[in-house]
Image (cartoon, rainbow, N blue to C red):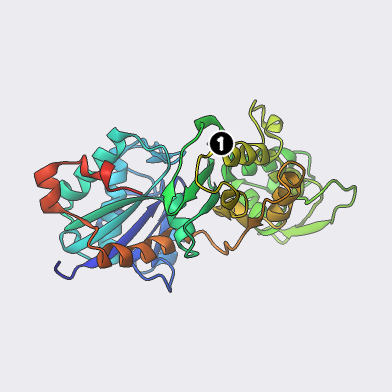
Amino acid sequence: MAEFSDIVIDCGSDTIKAGIANPESKPSLVFPSNLFTNESLNKKSSSINQIREKKYIFDCSLADPIKRGRIVNWGAMENVWRYTFNELQVNSNQCNVLLSEMAFATYKERKEKVEIMYEKFGVQNLFICMDAALSLFSLRQYTGLVVDSGYDVTRIIPIYSGIPHYVKHSDQILNIGGNSISKYLEFLLVDNPASNSINSDTVNNIKEQLAYVREEKSHYFEEKFFQLFDGTSVKLKKELYKAPEVLFKPELLGIDTDPLHIKILKTASSVEVADPSEIYRNIYLFGGNSLFPGLKCRIQNELLYKAPKAKVYNYNKDKFSAWVGGSEHCKVLTEHKSWISKEKYLEYGGDLFYTNFI
């Protein structure tokens, strides 16, 4: 196989993470998935900070290209990928590309991705891998229950010997993510004396900097203060732990579904593998919401009553686990010659990605 750059692209509902594969580093390109202009697609920005600071809107559609992990606007998505190659300063026709994909992706969706990558971008070699599996690979682990709580959905995926397993869809999906938590926090702050000075960006900053998960029932809570742009300090109390509580009490959002810990139990108990205890003993938290202090201990405590041998781990320090795992997996694909070449695609078609997929 000729030498080409290995590019990892992890597409989330909120953020795109991309870069030349290097498991020892972070993605060099990180930008919002739904904020662009046509101008930004044609001009290379001088720094990633520009992307973070500016707000862009897709000219082709005001709709988000990705919702709950699903691509819903292919024109916008194609622009995202084109922008990605431009910013990384690589020729797409001289690249191996590893794309992350959310669990439960449809045949039609994967077929569209494959066609765009080979036929419009001319990539040399391609592989598609489930983001939950990639997150686990980032720890160099290959068996466990991945709890991936992101922007607009939380997914529970059992992985055994590197292979994802599916049980009951409704048990593996909780349609609550960071966006739901932000909106509920905004609702809780309505009665705050400084509410008129608090916008959506401020709510997100409060959530990311101060919100936490209460580990157990207690009447004690800590007062904290958040400084607004005008220098005003906002006193915050119960809302800081009440907002993430929606993961454990979906009824607070008017959603009739099992809470997170029950879905974890149902999924773990339903998976059929050689040694089910390995799933219970290896529960890993990923996604932006895994960064809430107290989340690991709360889930561990909730599971204790019905699954005393369950063990929860949270090694997630940022939102880049799937990208790092993708970088690790690129080495495996090259060593085992598992990339799917453009020549194979032209000969056998997109069905290759159903027999060669993780």
Quadrant where the image shows the N terminus: bottom left
The number of callouts visible is 1
Q: Amino acid at mark 1?
A: Ser
Residue at x-position 40% and y-position 65%: 27
Establish if 203 lies above or below 51: above
Q: Which residue is mark 1?
A: 270
* Residue 89 can be seen, yes or no: no
Establish if 331 lies above or below 33: below
Foreground: 245 or 352? 352
Q: Position of residue 15 (x, y in %)?
A: 45, 52
Q: Position of residue 76 (x, y in %)?
A: 31, 42
The outermost residue toward the bottom is 24
Establish if 302 lies above or below 54: above
Foreground: 111 or 233? 111
Q: Position of residue 315 (x, y in %)?
A: 59, 63
Foreground: 118 or 121? 118
Residue 55 located left or right of residue 294: left
Q: Position of residue 201 (x, y in %)?
A: 59, 50
Q: What secondary structure is marked by label 1?
A: helix
